[in-house]
Amino acid sequence: MGKIRKIGVLTSGGDSPGMNAAIRAVVRTAIYEGREVMGIMCGYQGMIDADFKPLYANSVSDIIQRGGTILKTARCEEFRSPEGRAKAYGNLKGAGIDGVVVIGGDGSFTGARLFNEEYDIPFVGIPGTIDNDIFGTDYTIGYDTALNTVVEAVDKIRDTASAHNRMFFVEVMGAEAGFIALYSGIASGAEAIIIPEIKGEERNLKAMIAGGNTRKKSSNIIIVAEGDEGGGAFAIAESVKEDFKEYDIRVSVLGHLQRGGSPSAIDRVNASRLGHAAVEALIDDQKSVMVGISNGEITLVPFRRAVKLHKDVNRNLIELAKILSV
Ligand code: F6P
């Protein structure tokens, strides 16, 4: 049977649609492999508080289609300290947990990496964040659903923008990265897309926005990534309003609705693949690695690389968005 007999699973950081599908895959794969599973509640906080609950095949029935996470999630300050991690280790040992699957983003993997440098209980990560900003994987759980949510919302904004001949600045999530903004901008036919990855000479807000204005359009949609250096949609709208006096300008910040909802089919399938792969990786004695999907295949990426290296957006898509917005 090997040394991994009982597997802990937790979700950490911002929730994302498809986390439940990943939990289900972890639990059912572990049971298929003859292992036990413990749910760790509220991310790393549950490790520190010994908030564990056994999970069985039927504990994860009827959750594949649900957003959020049945294990709850949190960003845990205490786990950042050596004392917090020592407490967590003691509790994991006490509960007989031999390996842990962490579903979360880069902050969660940073904690996991530190823990694996200090202690002998292996951690394997699954990328779960709507931001899609993790190096070493083409895909993170929840990104596809969030993207579709944003596109649906922008389509609705387009209706009212056209009816009033308005220019809308729509702010979307993505933390420090522009993946959601770039892809949703292309998918919704935005006139301009403002993302943190556009810097220096490339970056001239007036020209970027005017680029989609070579003919008078009945509506203008400018997608703004929340992490952009311009300071968000309200600030950017304010800074260019004198240059676009002919437009009645409005701002819409989509906010947390981007994180909720039933996961898309793609998110469910990929979360299922990643959950299965994470358990297999633990059984194969892997530690301190993330399972990812690159070119359609499952890959293993050391946490060290996943958290340190920067994942860039596809620059050709920035160009494409410009060409198509004339
Ligand atoms: O990382 C996911 C994310 O939704 C980001 O896109 C956003 O910046 C952040 O989390 C919001 O976090 P909170 O839920 O703490 O407001």
Image (tube, rainbow, N blue to C red):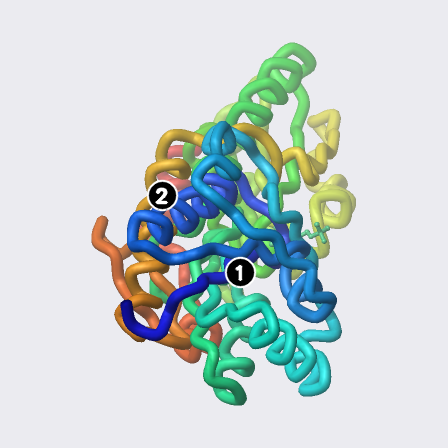
Up the image or down, 86 lies above or below 261; here it is below
Residue at the spot x=43%, y=79% of the render? 304
Quadrant assignment for the C terminus = top left
**Camera-side residue of 271 and 71:** 71
Marks 2 and 1, the one that precedes in the sequence: 1
| Residue type highlighted by circle 1 | Gly
The percent position of residue 145, horizontal first and vertical second, equals: 48, 35
The percent position of residue 16, horizontal first and vertical second, equals: 55, 44
Residue 147 seen from this side:
no
User: Residue under circle 2?
Assistant: 272
Up the image or down, 68 lies above or below 29; here it is above
Q: Residues within 10 Å of mark 1 (few under 14, many from 20)?
A: many
The percent position of residue 262, horizontal first and vertical second, equals: 53, 28
Residue 253: which quarter of the image? top right
Are circles 2 and 1 on residues that touch, CB within 8 Å? no
Q: Is residue 30 left or right of residue 130?
A: left
Residue at the spot x=52%, y=70% of the render? 96
Q: Which mark is residue 105?
A: 1
